[in-house]
């Protein structure tokens, strides 16, 4: 009687193992189809990204960007009236997505609307433009970039550091004038920083430079000075460059310290690694366990056999 009782779990385990194998065989064609579908989506994203880069390059080489922006500001001044600040803010979206420097719009906002209204319009416009570029980069370019970076073990620690101190790091990076504004949008889009933290930190971090440019815009005598005098190395611009260099050195040191502390904390707390790897925001592929293909019922049956023998 005892042997019959012991044989039943073993037969059940063999039957369960066969059923699992049958299910795996049936799922293989479906897995291949899903893999092919993902490959097609990745190819489409990469193609779209290359087309976007080609469009930006063509625009820089062929289009008179400064003249177009000057004509746009003239149209806002003469035709839109009270709707001007809203249209000015919305205009930041295509410029930021196409990586076109929007400092002319910021200066124009100060010239057209003054400090209170111009600063609010430019600040909101720069923030929504940065958010649009961030979402575009996270949708199109993230899979391509992370596929290259996930092979480096250091990227795991960097990703964890940005997740834990994302707001501080983004805020400090926005305060550094030497870092290109448009490039930073796309670089941050492939990191695990939450979208809300990115937007809030970007909004606060861009306020000082936005305020400075709007103030300079209020001192201009004519709208043509927005695109002409600012392009020359005047005393005002030299002052901004020197001030920017000094602030950049200080903030780069702060960024380095914050990032180093976050990395050390992330590496010291390895227990949180598994939870972060399961998150869709973290672009890291975990190494699968070698025993996942074994049915769990076999281990349970082994425990039951030992209890029967006792």
Image: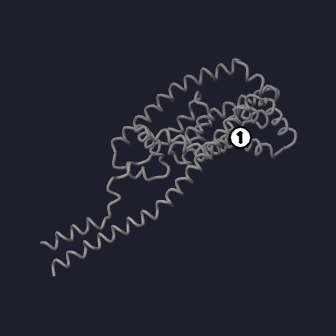
| Residue lying at 80% horizontally and 43% vertically, measured from the top left | 84
Vertically, is 262 above or below 239? Answer: below
Q: Which residue has dot 1 on it?
A: 92
SS at circle 1: helix
Location of residue 294 with respect to 169 vertically, above or below: below
Q: Residue at x 81, y 37 (%)?
A: 72
Q: Nearer the viewer, residue 302 or 94?
A: 302
Most extreme residue toward the left is 310
Q: Position of residue 308 (x, y in %)?
A: 16, 74
Q: Is 251 situated left or right of 23 in this image?
A: right
Image-quadrant location for residue 12:
bottom left
Quadrant of the snapshot with the C terminus: bottom left
Q: Name the spot of residue 259 as percent of width and height, x first.
A: 44, 35
Looking at the rendering, in which quadrant would you find the N terminus? bottom left
Q: Where does the image place residue 99, in percent across and percent down from the top left?
A: 67, 35
Colour setup of the view: one colour
The residue at the point 42 percent across, 66 percent down is 23
Identify the image quadrant of residue 108: top right
Q: Is residue 307 left or right of residue 268?
A: left
Q: Position of residue 202 (x, y in %)?
A: 59, 40
Near mark 1 (Cα within 10 A), the count class, few <14, some 14-19 or many ≥20, is many
| Front residue of this view, candidates 14 and 223 | 14
Towards the viewer: 222 or 269: 269
Q: Is residue 163 above or below residue 235?
A: below
């Amino acid at each position: 009687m005892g042997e019959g009782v012991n044989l039943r779990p073993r037969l059940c385990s063999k039957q369960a193992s066969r059923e699992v194998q049958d299910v795996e065989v049936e799922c293989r064609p479906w897995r291949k189809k899903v893999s092919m579908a993902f490959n097609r989506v990745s190819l489409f994203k990469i193609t779209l990204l290359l087309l976007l880069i080609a469009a930006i390059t063509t625009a820089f080489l062929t289009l008179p960007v400064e003249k177009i922006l000057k004509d746009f500001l003239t149209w806002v001044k003469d035709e839109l009236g009270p709707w001007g600040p809203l249209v000015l803010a919305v205009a930041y979206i295509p410029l930021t997505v196409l990586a076109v420097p929007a400092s002319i719009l910021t200066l124009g906002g100060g010239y057209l609307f003054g400090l209170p209204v111009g600063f609010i319009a430019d600040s909101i416009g720069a923030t929504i433009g940065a958010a649009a570029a961030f979402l575009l980069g996270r949708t199109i370019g993230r899979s391509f970039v992370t596929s290259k970076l996930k092979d480096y073990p250091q990227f795991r620690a960097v990703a964890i550091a940005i997740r834990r101190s994302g707001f501080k790091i983004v805020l400090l990076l926005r305060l550094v004038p030497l870092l290109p504004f448009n490039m930073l949008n796309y670089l941050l889009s492939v990191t695990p920083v939450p979208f809300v933290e990115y937007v809030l930190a970007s909004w606060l971090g861009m306020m000082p430079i936005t305020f400075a440019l709007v103030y300079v815009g209020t001192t201009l005598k004519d709208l043509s000075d927005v695109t002409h005098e600012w392009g020359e190395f005047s005393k005002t611009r030299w002052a901004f460059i020197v001030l920017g260099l000094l602030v950049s050195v200080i903030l780069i040191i702060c960024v380095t310290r914050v990032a180093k502390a976050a990395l050390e904390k992330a590496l010291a707390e390895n227990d949180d690694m598994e939870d972060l790897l399961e998150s869709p925001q973290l672009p890291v592929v975990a190494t699968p366990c070698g025993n996942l293909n074994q049915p769990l019922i076999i281990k349970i049956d082994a425990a039951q056999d030992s209890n029967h023998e006792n």
